[in-house]
Image (spheres, grey):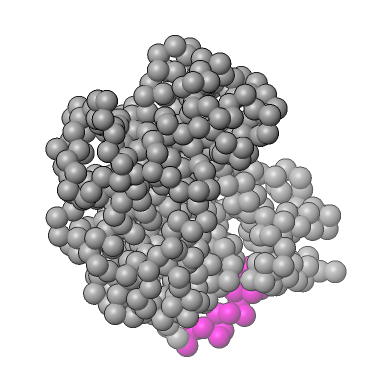
Amino acid sequence: MDPVTIVLILFLLALLLFATEWLPVDVTALGLLSALLVTGLLTPKEAFAGFGSDTVLTLAGLFILTRVLLRAGVIEWIGAALARRARNPHGMLRGVLGTVAGVSAFTSNTATTAVFLPVVAGMSRRAGLPASRALMPLAFASILGGTVTLIGTSTNLVVSGALPTTGLRPLGFFELAWVGIPTALIGLLYLFFVAPRLLPAREAHLEESLREYLADLTVEPGSPLDGLTLRETGLGRDHGLTVVAVRRGAETVYAPPPHFLVRAGDTLAVEGPTERILAGKNTLGVVSKSEQKLQGVSAASPAEVRLVEAVVMPGSTLLGRTLKESRFRERYGVSVLAVHRRQKTLERMADLRVRVGDVLLMQGDATRIDGLGEHLVVMGDLTQRQSDLRRAPAALMVFGGAVVLGGLGLVPLAVAVVVAVALSLMLRLITPEEAYGAVEWPVIVLVACMLAFGTAFEATGAAKVLTGELSGVLDPLGPYGLLAALFLVTVALTQPMSNQAAALVMLPLAIGTAKVLGYDPRPFVIGITIAASNSFITPLEPSCMLVYGPGRYTFLDFVRVGLGLTVVTFVVAMLVIPLVWPFHAAP
C-alpha cells in the first residue's frame, strides 16, 4: 500500500480514537508509533527521537517543579494570604481570580485550581455568593492564565517543540502574551460580570466525602489568630475548621462561643478534613506540640518523613487509654497529628481514649512507620499532601531562576528546567520518588509519539497531499477566513480529546495549508495554540473536572457559560493575531 495512504488511514484512525477515548490517549499514541515502526515508515531512531527531545524533557521538568512549589506551600500561602486580607469579599473574590490567572501562567492549571478551590469556596460563603457562581470562574481563570507564557500549559510547549520539525522557529517564552494577556483580561471581565448571571445558585459540597479529623493546634506568638474572636478568625467560614474546645492553661472551654477571644498559647481542638488541618498548620501560625517534640529528638531528614493514616485494630494496647497515657510518641517514634472517630465529640484530642476503628493521622520517620506492628494498620500514605513553608524561599528561588534564565533566553529553557530539577533534588525540596510520581507520564508518551507521527506525516508526503486538498477548499475564505476556520475546528476537537492531541493533529494541516496558499504560517500556529487551550464548553478539562462535583454543575452549565467565553477568546484572537503576526511575512 502507498505510504501516503497508510499515514492518512492511521491519521483518521488516531483522530477517531482520540475523540472517543475508547483507549487511553497514551495507549492510542503508542499504537500509532508501533504501526509506523511495523510498516517501516519510520526507522527506530526516528520513531524514538521524540522521547529524548527538548520538549519532553522540559515538560517532565515542569511537572516536577510545579510539585516542588506545591510541597513548599507557595501557592497555598498565596491563597491563604489573600483570604486573610479580604475586606470586601466580592472585590477580593475578583482579585483572587486575577491572581489565579497570574499564577497559572507559570504553573499547572490543574494544580492551581486544586489549591485555590477551598479559598474561593470560603470567600464565596463570606460574600453570601453561591459557590456555583465562583468555582467555574475559578477553573476558567486558570485556563485563561495558561495562554500567557510558553510554560503556562503543556500544550504551548508541545506546539513549540513540534515547530522545528516543520522548519519554523519555536515559540518565544512570552510570545503568546501578545494575545494571551488581552484574552485573559477580557475573559476575566466576562467571568466577573457575565458568568455569575448565567450560573445557577447552588451551594458547594466540598467535604461530603472527606474524613473529619480532630487535632490539637497551639496558637504561636505572632499568629494572625492572636487577639481575634473565633468569628473574626474565619476558621470555619474560610478554612473549613470547627473549633470544638479551647485549652488555656489548666482551663478547658468546650464549644466556645463565636465571641471567644483567641490568645497566643491557647490550644485549639479543631475538627476538619486532612487537607484543611495541614493547611492550617502552615498558614495560620499554629503548631502541633506532639509534632514539635518529635522533631526535637528525631534525626530524620524532611525527605524521609512520611504522613500516613493508620487504623487501630482489636487487641491493641492503646485501647481505653489516651495517647499520652500509652506513651505513644516514645513507644512508636511517630507523632499523632489528628484522630478520626465516626461519632462527633467535644473532647480535645489529648483527652480522647483510643477505641477500635479510630483512624490516626501520623507523621514520622519512614522506618518507624513501617514498624508500627499488626495492631496499627496503615490505610494510606498522604505524604505528598503536606507542605512545608520553610522550603518556600528555596523553592521560589529555584523555580524563579529557571523562569528568568529560560524566559530571557540566557540559557535554553530545557537546560534551565533540568538544572532547576537537579537543584530541587539536591536541596531535598522533593524526593526522587515524588519527582517521578509528579510527572504526568501519559502526556509525555502522547507528546513523544505524536512528534514521531509528525515526522512521518511530513516525510511520506501525506501532509502535502492533505494540505493540497484543503487549500482548494479554504482558498476562497482568505486569510481571515482560514484563521477562523482553523481556530473553530481546533476548539471543536479539543472538547472531546486532549488539548495536546488536538494541537498536534491540527498543526501540520495549518502550516501546510498556509504555505500552499502563500501565507506566513506563524499567525495560524498562534491561533491553533490559543484555541487548543480553549476548553470551556465541556467539563472534560482537568481543571473543570475539579469543580464539576463541588459546584454541583451540570453539563449544560458549562455549555451555557463556556460558549460565551469561547466567543470572547475567538473575537480577541481574530483582532489581535493579524496585528502582531501579519499573514504575509515581511520580505
Q: Is residue 313 left or right of residue 409?
A: right
* Image quarter (top left, top right, bottom left or bottom right) of the C terminus: bottom left
Q: Is 377 placed above or below 175 here?
A: above
Residue beneath the point at 38% across and 21% down: 292
Write down the region rendered in magenta.
460-476
In percent of width and height, residue 394 lies at 35, 27
Which residue is nearer to you in this view: 56 or 93? Answer: 93
Q: Is residue 385 visible?
A: yes
From the image, give the main secondary structure of the stretch colored magenta: helix
Please identify the quarter of the rendering in which residue 365 is found: top right
Whether 470 is among the magenta residues is yes
Q: Is 25 placed above or below 271 here?
A: below
Whether 459 is among the magenta residues is no
**Badge count:** 0
In percent of width and height, residue 197 lies at 29, 80
Q: Is residue 550 left or right of residue 264?
A: right
Residue beneath the point at 50% across and 73% down: 538
Which residue is nearer to you in this view: 271 or 143? Answer: 271
In percent of width and height, residue 420 lies at 43, 31
